[in-house]
Amino acid sequence: MTRRSLTMAALCTLLLALVAGSGLAPSCSRQVGSDDGAPVDTEIMAFLSEARALHHEANMKEESGDLAGAGAAMDRLVAAQRPHPERKAGQPPPPEVEEVLADAYARLAELRLKNGELERAAVAVKSGLEHVAEATYFRGHLVEVQGLVEEARGAQLADAGKPAEAARAREHAIQLLEEVVKIQEQVIQRSLGKDGG
């Protein structure tokens, strides 16, 4: 499965889980509680739909070789108006929104990395990590992309004739990838605990 199809599957699964799992009416006019007690409502569903559309747009542009256009679609997503800006200070944004933003920043970083923009990719990862503090799939994916950025930085340094710096960057990449393994193992363990397995 490609990264694009995995992203779309994750967004579709999240959208379907919210609708089916929460008992949300097809019109999205009835509010019901999500796992954290916050409503899954029309605004959140609209944001998720907007995210899907922008990911589709990014897919088409990336497939045609327009990495800048694909990145622009992800830039639009991370800058999009977010549901429930009226939430009180200290109250976290809806988790569905945070996960979509974390995933969008990861994709933006990957696109920038493909375009050779290492610093901009690193900034996108950092921005994405601000949306997922706990060990989740999305945090693990962002740290994975961070590791890929460091790997690319190592290659760039090696090409520039800086072997010691290149080795440090590669070592940092390995440490980040090991962190990914730990995060995703926590996610799996937590999931198994919920399922009683």
Image (cartoon, rainbow, N blue to C red):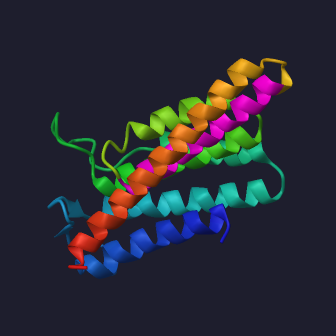
Image quadrant where residue 152 sits? top right
Relative to 18, residue 162 above or below: above
Return the residue nearer the eye: 112 or 75: 112
Residue 59: x, y in percent? 69, 60
**Magenta-colored stretch includes residue 114:** no
Q: Residue at x 59, y 56 (%)?
A: 54
Q: Quadrant of the C terminus?
A: bottom left
Whether residue 172 sits left or right of residue 133 in the image: it is right
Return the residue nearer the eye: 35 or 143: 143
Relative to 139, residue 149 above or below: above
Total labels drawn? 0
Whether residue 2 sits left or right of residue 18 in the image: it is right
Whether residue 85 sits left or right of residue 184 in the image: it is left
Q: Main secondary structure of the magenta part?
A: helix
Relative to 126, residue 102 above or below: below
- Magenta span covers which residues? 136-158
**Magenta-colored stretch includes residue 157:** yes
Q: Residue at x 71, y 19 (%)?
A: 164
Relative to 67, residue 33 above or below: below
